[in-house]
Image (cartoon, grey):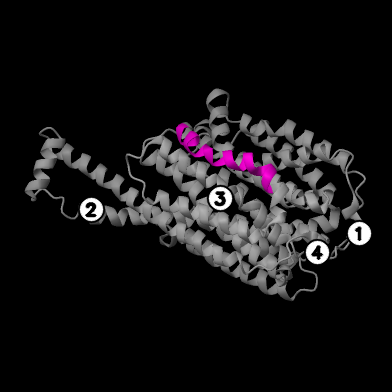
Amino acid sequence: MTTEFRPPNLALSTIGLSLATFMQVLDTTIANVSLPTIAGNLGVSNNQSTWVITSFAVSMAIALPLTGFLSRRFGEVKLFTACTLLFALTSFLCGISQSMGMLIVFRALQGAVAGPMYPITQSLLIGIYPAAKRGMALALLAMVTVVAPIAGPILGGWITDNYSWPWIFFINVPIGIFASMVVANQLRGKVEKTERPKIDYVGLISLIIGVGALQIVLDKGNDEDWFNSTFIIVTSIVSAIGIAVFLIWELTDKDPIVDLKLFRHRNFTIGTLAMVLGYAAFFAIALLVPLWLQQNLGYTSTWAGYATAPLGVIPVLLTFFVGKYAMRMDLRLLAALSFLVMGGTCFMRSNFYLDVDFNHVAMVQLWQGLGVALFFMPTLTILLSDLQQHEIAAGSGLATFMRTLGGSFSASLTTLMWTRRAVTHHEQLAEHINPYNPVSQEAMQHLGRGDSQLGGSIINGMITQQGYQISFNEVFHVLGWVFIGLVAVIWLAKPPFTPKARPVAGGH
């Protein structure tokens, strides 16, 4: 039985798996702050450079739900090793790119091989740890998931400023080679039964078209002014048709490339819903706070990174305790506490103002870390709890795919809501500011030191800032209620949440 396999050195195996996952998750954010430098060096506009992010996200979103199919075909250990080595190779190719076209192609390939890495790591960790210690493995993976996106922009900015942008990709090469060699060596005795499932070409093609087009819409929607753009309208139609064909075909095909029937499991459905919505709200916070710090409060990208970094402190400190003791409690209680804490910090931010100091921002981030520490491991354990061993890779890939899409939707909707509401508030605040209002005239003269036009410009800037601030507060008020709503959702899951309580199919 594959579940009885134990590697020669469990700690070394865990380090290898965790390093690869850290590297892969880090790469989802590390290039973000380097885009202006990359655009300048390769002679393209900043708008064109965003395809470096989009191409990676599109390919990864397509590859994630294919994890189950690929693991059945090649085996989890071989798939992990191959993906990690290919990730190192494509990272090297990204670093030596001489044009934006080359970089986008290699980033797309990097995203494609990155897709299965996280879910396969999850499945392998569950497989090599005894049932009583699997909580520890998932807690460690959850910590990596939290810390890596925080570290990405800080590390990317530091490398770009002190060395050159290709090194944000080159650092993956030694890490990828080391991790793949360690895992291949430690898990070489793991017996895995592989299959040769027929390739579901209709499902695969409709997945690529539907999800690929959807990811492009979500990534480019704000830049293209959404449905005022012909490109967005056409891409949305293509996406809708592709996804409709994909869903109908996969639910009726005898051997689908993505097993949507996993949603027949109650805990998988409820856990995935909680994970997707919780992660989407968490992602909105992670996106909006640094943007607000830089745009409204005038922070540099480095100082914005420092202000948001305390988020990772408590998850790191609590990993051991959550992993060791969480399974002794009702995991729904821990997840509910997580949502209450994160909802509370959102309500705190809904009272922020333009003169809020660094310590206040950092302290709220620190407290949010408590919620994050209690979120990933319990929710992940719940959603995997009623899957058979041979379903874990497919279930993890599907849940991670849904979570990734949730993050993309969140990024687009949060940015749209923030900017649109800011415009509305600007209009409302500026209604009574005009040259014919004596109070306005006096304020313009005073601020412009006699120059009314300069004074008007200063007042307009102040109104814009206030508009964005009010909109920021509104967004966080909504996010707070999203988290409160998730408290009810998670209680729809049904114990038990431990693999010991159910039969496990071996040899698959």
Task: Give the tally of numbered discs.
Answer: 4
Q: CA distance from mark 2 to mark 3?
A: 36 Å
Q: Amino acid at mark 2?
A: Leu
Q: Are marks 4 and 3 in contact (CB under 8 Å)?
A: no
Q: Earlier in the sequence, mark 1 or mark 2?
A: 2
Give the Cα distance between marks 1 and 4. 19 Å
Three-letter residue code for mark 4:
Ala
Question: Of marks 4 and 3, which one's residue comes earlier in the chain?
Answer: 3
The answer to which of marks 1 and 4 sits earlier in the sequence is 4
Residue matched to label 4: 501
Judge whether residue 92 is colored magenta.
no
Quarter holding the C terminus is bottom right
Most common secondary structure along the magenta stretch: helix
Q: Nearer the viewer, mark 2 or mark 3?
A: 3
Residue of label 1: 507
Rounded to the nearest angstrom, the CA distance separating label 4 from label 3 is: 28 Å
Circle 2 crowding by C-alpha within 10 Å: few under 14, some 14–19, many from 20: some
Name the quarter where the N terminus is drawn.
bottom right
Q: Which residues are magenta?
A: 303-322
Alpha-carbon distance for marks 2 and 4?
Answer: 60 Å
Residue at image mark 3: 371
- Front of the two marks 2 and 4: 4
Q: Position of residue 439 (x, y in %)?
A: 9, 47
Q: Residues within 10 Å of mark 1 (few under 14, many from 20)?
A: few
